Image: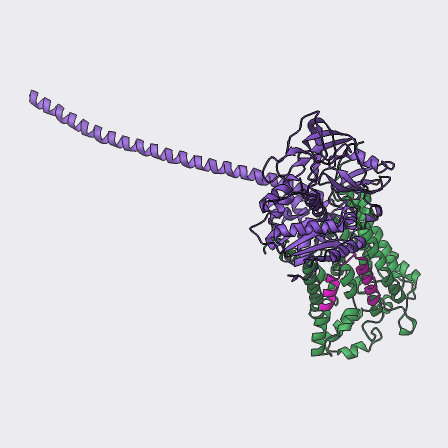
Chain colours: A green, B purple
Amino acid sequence: MNFPINSSPHVLPITSVPIIMRHVLYALIPSTIVYVWYFGFGIFINMLIASIAALISEAIMLRIRNRPIKPSLADGSAIVTAILIAFSIPPLAPWWLPVLGASSAIVLAKHLYGGIGANIFNPAMVGYAILLLSFPVQMTHWIPPQIENLGFQNIDLWSTVLYSVTGSLPSNLNLDAITQATPLDIVKGGLKNGISINELRSGPLFSQLGGYGWEWINIFTAFGGVYLLYKGIIRWHIPVSLLTSITIFAALFYLYDPNQNLSPSFHLLSGATVLGAFFIATDPVSAAATNQGRLIYGASIGALTYAIRTWGGYPDGLAFAVLLMNLMVPLIDRFTTPKIYGQQQ
Amino acid sequence: MLKYPLFQSFYGGVHLESHKNTSNHKQIARDFLPSRLIIPMNQQFGSDAIPSVKVGQLIQKGEVIGKPAEKNTTAVHASCSGRVGAIEKHPVPTAGKVSTSTCVIIETNDENNIAAQKPPLFKNHLDKLTAINHAGIVGLGGAAFPTAEKLNRKSSHCEMLILNGAECEPYISCDDLLMQEHATEVLRGALAMMEIVGAELTVVVIEKDKPKAIEAISNAIETIGSKCIRLTDIPTMYPTGGERQLVEALTGKEVPSGKYPIDVGCICQNVGTAYALDCFFQLGEPLINRIVTVTGQGVKNPQNVAVPIGAPIVELIKFCGGYDGEVSQLILGGNMMGYTVDTDQLPVTKSTNCIITTKKATTPKPFEIWPCIRCGECIPVCPVRLLPQQILKAYENKNFEELGKLGLSECIECGCCDVVCPSHIPLVENFRKAKHLRMQEIKSSELSNAAQKRYELKTQRLSSQHANTEKLHADLKESIKESSKNDMIKAAVERSKKRRDKK
């Protein structure tokens, strides 16, 4: 009998890239449901458009780069990027916003650097940054929570779809009337105009812990994150160090002057903090590799996010903090190499 | 004594799905007698033994058929009685690959008397070690390192003998069964080893997934009543059974790169080796058979068999009921660190601890391989604390200097990184190729460095020679110039004198 020769180990791997991506998508389900509860079906439309755009861009780039198309399309990484972009753009957005975001993420941030595994920057955050810098108006037209008793004018699914496709609203709706700034935006602008935190937080967009609705989205995002930890898809180092560092900074400044600085709970539960900690900063390709390096990477993102939110020009600084730290990864990796067994340092 | 906190932990490692219960529910089969033996002369580290029998000669079980070529190598014995059929080159599985070695082929007969069944007597320590070599005793954990050589480390003090019954490979159960059935003999062998190396303590290490072996050994320790033997059951974690990992786990010390456990005061011996040593000391029996786990989905009756060394694998499989349907792979050793062979016409050697017959392909198909996504899962599992993903990158870039810095040569090829890689990259395979390429690179760079040096020396020599000749020429010219000038003046003076004289 003749048997084939194979290299050891002779064992099937326990996981795969598509499995990881699938679990990441599963983990985003709870926060998506809460998001829809508060902000309507807009995010669904954006997810759909962004996913289609991401897949098409991926296929075109693979074709141009002469790489096999099917396995890379099926690995799910493009969809994860698209979903994360859908989370970071306003629920009420013209169709070309998610298209531009997703395709620039895939084309510029992913494939121009060599495709999956070779990108330096987090693709979703590159897509988001490009949108925010190019279309600041559209990117800050957030709709208020779609809850009847808050006193805002709500927008139905059909009008959302119509706005996405045609860019205009039915005659009975006015864009300015149905959109609001995000809580972080309001705080940023308010503080600049000398309004104290207490006054700002008495507005209808705020709740006990953070922005109205946002606190629950963040909490359910954290559930998804815990699921990823439980499944072993991500390790604790980045989320824990990121959340800890943002909490420490927020607590220090809050204790110093609670009227000029937001509380730690507000920092944790508004904007993209939790999504960033569990789903964005943990993108393996663009994060630091060793556990020690990941602690440094996560803590630095937390600190930078706090700094940009507090003193920078943007209400939420997570995306820029992640992109800045992506640049530092080779350096962090260099200095956190573990000591090899049996060798002197 | 007993100062070690027994079982701390070692870095890295993975939990693997156990397949031990495929083969460990039956007693060791001891009635396997092959019709033919292919006994290789190269079953150990160091030089091959020299055949000491002639074709056609009748030999008895236990008789020496290969003499050690050097002082510190081991002898080879006939593992069954019979007639020498041939002495020829035959493919033999050794150290991770199949190579050709001189083998003594024996046509066995039914007489199964063992030659020289007397417990040996020793004059002194050295005599004992030589006798162990002559009994052909080598490490039975898989490396087949001569046991006497390992026990003979007089320059360093040995504090602890580690008796390795961890058996972390998911399919292998031969040590498990041996400890269950021969716990007393194993411990007696260990005590003998301890006496030879002068250790104060023996620690028997068994993974927790072998409760029966743990029970048998702890009972035997009680019966023997020795205070120098301790049993440590350790969590089931691959690769705890690795020497260096065991030392780290038990003492917290690391074996320095390029050195051996004895350099930190430990000696590791496999439980099978201890048993073989006891058989020799008690009965005078040389190492002529070993326990082999025959397992996997591709064999009808998976079990542990006491196999005469040199038995053809094909006969062993037949003894275990034959193949069960289509077999996709034949693996010698465990599924993590063992190697595949293309034929079953090979003999069982002293290092064959397990034969796995698989039915499904266990290597991912090429279209299931993705590029590295830098997830870093390979980093915390590496027991040597390497960065597999960076080594892979350096290998792809053919950056040999970086490979050296990243510690490629320290890789023990345990395969933990392969198991956890979501991109299914055959990392160990790549690292083996990288090691090979790096060696070539180092060799060729040494060669080119030597050539460069020769060239530099030559040009230096030539240029200094050149300078010398130049100088010589110049001096000569100068001297000629000087002398000819003087001559010319002289001649002119002479001529003018003559002219004046004529006038």
Q: Main secondary structure of the magenta part?
A: helix
**With respect to residue B211, does B44 lie above or below?**
above
Q: Position of residue B59 (x, y in %)?
A: 71, 30
How many numbered callouts?
A: 0
Q: Is residue B141 left or right of residue A155?
A: left
Magenta stretch: includes residue A209 = no
Quadrant where the image shows the C terminus of chain B: top left
Front residue of A56/B457: it is B457
Q: Determine which quarter of the picture holds residue A137.
A: bottom right
Front residue of B118/A283: it is B118
Magenta stretch: includes residue A234 = yes
Question: Residue at (66%, 52%) from the top-left corner?
Answer: B244
Residue B234 visible here: no
Question: Residue at (85%, 57%) from the top-left corner?
Answer: A26
Q: Position of residue B92 (x, y in %)?
A: 71, 34
Q: Position of residue A135 (x, y in %)?
A: 77, 60
Front residue of B403/B118: it is B118
Front residue of B455/B476: it is B455
Q: Determine which quarter of the picture holds residue A179.
A: bottom right
Q: Is residue B250 left or right of residue A184?
A: left
The stretch in magenta equals A218-244
Residue B392 visible here: yes
Q: Determine which quarter of the picture holds residue A138.
A: bottom right
Q: Position of residue A1 (x, y in %)?
A: 81, 31
**With respect to residue B75, does A83 lie above or below?**
below
Residue lying farthest to the top in this orientation: B502
Quadrant where the image shows the N terminus of chain B: bottom right
